[in-house]
Each structure stands twice: as structure tokens, then as C-alpha cells.
Image: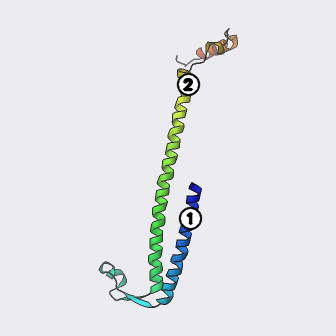
Amino acid sequence: MIRWLRLAAMATAIATMIALGVVAGLFLVANSGWVPVRVPPWLVFVLGNRPHEIWLPALIAGWLGSAILLVALLLGSVSYVWRRRQYEALVARLERELTKLRNLPFTEPAPLEDLPETPDAEAAKVMAALDDEPGREA
């Protein structure tokens, strides 16, 4: 079901983009002139106070590009937040599992039948030698 919805959403998005491209192309062919654009007061010191002639298709492409960039940034940030939440949930789950494994000897100690019946003499010698090392505190 989800695969079908994803396929339908992608097909709708592609068809919408094609339709917008056709409409924008036809609009730009019909209106391919130059238009005067006045400079806003806060940009007068950079561009001057005279009106500028701008090619209408370039102006519309700039608006369209800005809108597409804004939508892409919005979707990218939403995707980033969603992926980060997934990673944090995974890390929390792994930390809980690790805590459970670290506490395993306390929550489920080894049964006595798993311990050796007689102590190992070699292991006792090694442990005694470690205890006798100088500078080692108990």
C-alpha cells in the first residue's frame, strides 16, 4: 500500500512539473518582452535611482528559482530533522540494550553449576603475583 502511494505521489509530482514547465514556457513565449523595474528605496545607494529594464523570462525564472530553492531548503531541513530523530532513537535503543547487557551479571548471575568445582592453582598464583606488585593499592 505504501509503495503504491509513493509511486502515485511521484507520478503526480512529475506530471505537475511537466505541466508547470509547459505553462511557463507558453507564458514566456507570449510575454518575451522587456519590463521596467523600479529600484526599492533601500537599494538606491547600490543600483541607483533609475528604472532598470529586465527581460521578463529572466525575471520569472529568478522568481521560480527562488521559490524552488526555498522549497528544497524546507524539505531538506524536514528530512534532516526526521533522520536525526531516527538516529537518536536508534542510539537510545542501543544504549538501553548495552545497559541491559552490562548489568547482566547482576540481574542474571551465572548458575553455580557453571563454576569450576576446584580452584585453579595457576590462576591463584597469577592473582597473588598481581597483588604483590609494588605500587599497587588494594
* Residue at image mark 2: 104
Q: Nearer the viewer, residue 41 or 93?
A: 93
Count neighbours of disc 1 (C-alpha within 10 A) and say few if under 14, some if 14 to 19, many if 20 or more: few
Looking at this view, is 8 or 54 the one in front?
8
Q: Residue furthest top?
A: 118
Amino acid at pointer 2 = Leu
How far apart, in angstroms, are the residues tagged by discs 2 and 1?
48 Å
Q: Is residue 10 above or below residue 43?
A: above
Total marks drawn?
Answer: 2
Q: Position of residue 125 (x, y in %)?
A: 66, 12
- Disc 1 marks a residue whose amino acid type is Met
User: Up-down: is 101 above or below 19?
Assistant: above
Rendered position, 65 above or below 47 = above
In the rendering, at what x and y percent does residue 96 appear?
Answer: 51, 34
What residue did someone put label 1 on? 10
Residue sitting at 46 percent across and 57 percent down?
78
Q: Which residue is at 51% across, 76% downward?
A: 20
Answer left or right for 96 relative to 51.
right
